[in-house]
Image: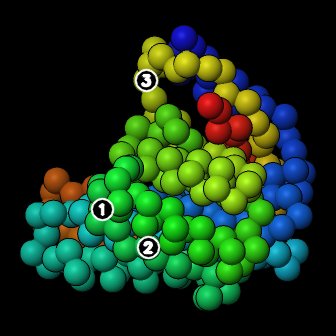
Amino acid sequence: MIPAGKALRAMEALPLGALADIAGDRPVLVMAPHADDESLGCGGLIAALCRIGAPPVVLVLTDGAGSHPGSAAFPPARLAQIRQDEAREAVRLLGLPADRIHFAGHRDTAAPTGGPAFDAAAEQVSALCRTFGIGTLLAPWRHDPHCDHEAADLLARAVAGRLALRHLSYPVWGWTLPAEYPLPEMPDGLRLDIRHDLDAKTAAIMAHQTQYGGLITDDPTGFTLPAELLQVFARPYETFLDPGP
């Protein structure tokens, strides 16, 4: 087993790759467990692909309605719509055409991991891949400590295997793993230089106002993006990993 602290330091030192090394030569599908993961983990890549005329497709898996369960001003249906609007604005700031973002609508914290619901979700993702001629699937790292991120990894594995697609992982919450947390392998992959697109990425992250704690003020237990995580995504690179076994 590898301590997470050692693995994360290794991820920070991975070699830089070209955009084509990560995206390949066919369209990319970015699977985001929640609205904001697309900007946090892949905002620079999305902006870079849009700049060269190869916009990816973004699929947001969950409705985001569970982030502030105690809010009376923002009940689940209203919050879900706002989260969707925020995601549309975020990817617009990255240059993504409006028809390239889609929403699966799974309940927050309940993205399927097995059974008929998982099979239906895998078919939905597969259909999207066929429609857009996807060649590479990007999904969160399997060691991201969140159930919806784990579900996204499982879906990506299933669809990539079914359609013979490339599959790469991007860490989000994995960057916050405790230093001594045991990981089964040393991660391998590439970093992407996003200096030219960092401002666009930062603006896209900021578009997710419900996640910053200033918009929804009647739920003190509601979710807020932690400063230490935001600092990670202010770096001038993004990290893409071999998903492992």
| Whether label 3 touches label 1, CB < 8 Å | no
Residue type, label 2: Ala
Q: In screen coordinates, is 9 left or right of 36?
A: right
Residue found 37% across the figure and 50% down from its top = 114
Q: Position of residue 79 (x, y in %)?
A: 27, 76
Where disc 3 sits, the SS reads loop
Q: Position of residue 185 (x, y in %)?
A: 62, 20
Q: Earlier in the sequence, mark 2 or mark 3?
A: 2
Q: In screen coordinates, is 157 left or right of 96?
A: left
Q: Which residue is mark 1?
A: 108
Quadrant housing the N terminus? top right
Where disc 1 sits, the SS reads loop
Q: Which residue is mark 2?
A: 104
Measure the C-alpha gap from mark 2 to mark 1.
Answer: 11 Å
Residue type, label 1: Asp
Q: Position of residue 6 (x, y in %)?
A: 61, 17
Measure the C-alpha gap from mark 2 to mark 3.
Answer: 31 Å
94 up-or-down from 70: above or below:
below
Residue 181 in view of the camera = yes
